[in-house]
Image (cartoon, rainbow, N blue to C red):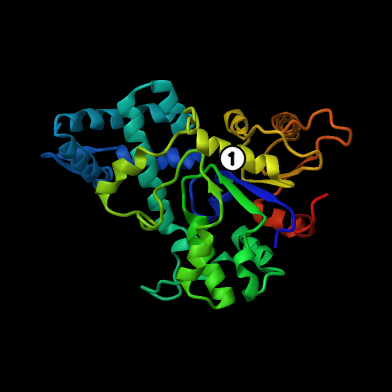
Amino acid sequence: MFRAKTVLVLGAGASVDLGLPMGDQLLKDIRELLDFKFDFNRPVSGDNFFFEALKHHCREDGDNERLNNYLKSGRRIVTASLQALSIDNLVDALEDPEVTFVAKMAIVRAIHQSESKSLCSKRLREHDKDIDLSAFAGHWYSSLSKLLFEGIRLSSINQIFENLEIISFNYDRCLEAYLPHSMANYYGIPFDEANALVEKLPIHRPYGIAGPLRIVPFGGGKSLFLPAIAANIHTFTEQVTDDSALAAIKSSIEKADRIVFLGFAFHRQNLKLLEAETHGHTEVLATAYGISRNDQGVIQQEVADAFRMSGRLHGNNVDLMEMKCADFFNSNWRTLTAEAA
């Protein structure tokens, strides 16, 4: 159990071991989705599901000619992506509403495809509804479950998320898919009861989500839903303008005793979204796998500035660790379960 008010901040690295893509792989996946070639108006390459979603959207708008414009936008993405750092950077650079729309649809489609191949899609038996939890051995999801369950009896299960909030910069729904199965298995309760508890866990999504699970199945649903889901996500270069969502994120940071970054890349725009006044005792722990020592020093200072920690009598309490998420949990078990300092 979390004994101190804890905020987990999730970046792409927190989902990569599940089978979800980092930025460069996501860009490659999107390029394959949009690389359409036709034979007598029928696609022989590119993603047919995506093509059907575009056609349906154009029919709803009553503008069938727009389909060709969307396909041209997809071609622009394919050709320009070879020089792009990420799909987000490309969308920002091209400043084209149709490119943005097609790119967002492609992001959602790529995330759904990755979900369908992820650990959360491994089942105990063919066609079984239960996730194969053994597939998560050694993964930080399993460590998180053990931490949550420690000290929580069945009679007090309603308190399991009492001191936890999550800020996820990812679009995938893996955590929401995993936790109910893990809880139902451990406590022997119906899945629906476990799922209802997970739905009460505050998960803030500054850039949106690839559809709520109660509406869009894990791994994606019908193609006609794709445009609507895409309209509700943001790329990281876009300004987030939902005041209530930003206020909720700010509030979670302000209340936190402990802020934990997992697989986070510390993009400055994302840090800016988290800016808030923290307690004098608030500590920050973070994975820094693959980040150089020089960059770690810069990140420590930028995080301290974002949380108004700079100049405090006892230092800035920002600790970066060169390890993956699973190793981080194993190495910091007592710290993560400790009372507030």
Q: Is residue 108 above or below residue 76?
A: below
Please tell me how many numbered marks the rendered image carries.
Answer: 1
Lateral position of residue 55 relative to residue 130, left or right:
left
Q: Is residue 96 above or below residue 225?
A: above
Mark 1 crowdedness (10 Å alpha carbons): few <14, some 14-19, many ≥20 = many
Q: Which residue is mark 1?
A: 249
In which image quadrant can residue 267 be found? Answer: top right
* Image x and y of residue 54, in percent: 23, 39
Check disc 1 and give the amino acid type.
Ile
Seen from the viewer's position, the closer of residues 304 and 331 is: 304
Lateral position of residue 260 relative to residue 24, left or right:
right
Q: Residue at x 53, y 60 (%)?
A: 198
Lateral position of residue 21 relative to residue 276, left or right:
left
Q: Is residue 118 above or below residue 260?
A: below
* Image x and y of residue 193, in percent: 49, 70
Q: Quadrant of the N terminus?
A: bottom right
Residue that sits furthest to the left in the current view: 40
Q: Is residue 290 above or below residue 121?
A: above
* Image x and y of residue 66, in percent: 19, 29
In which image quadrant can residue 321 be found? Answer: top right
Seen from the viewer's position, the closer of residues 43 and 184 is: 184
Residue that sits furthest to the bottom in the current view: 188
Q: Residue at x 44, y 24 (%)?
A: 92
Seen from the viewer's position, the closer of residues 194 and 16 is: 194
Instruction: Say what secondary structure mark 1 lies in.
Output: helix
Q: Residue at x 45, y 66 (%)?
A: 122
Q: Quick check: can you spot residue 76?
A: no
Residue that sits furthest to the right in the current view: 313
* Image x and y of residue 208, in percent: 45, 42
Q: Quick check: can you spot residue 22?
A: yes
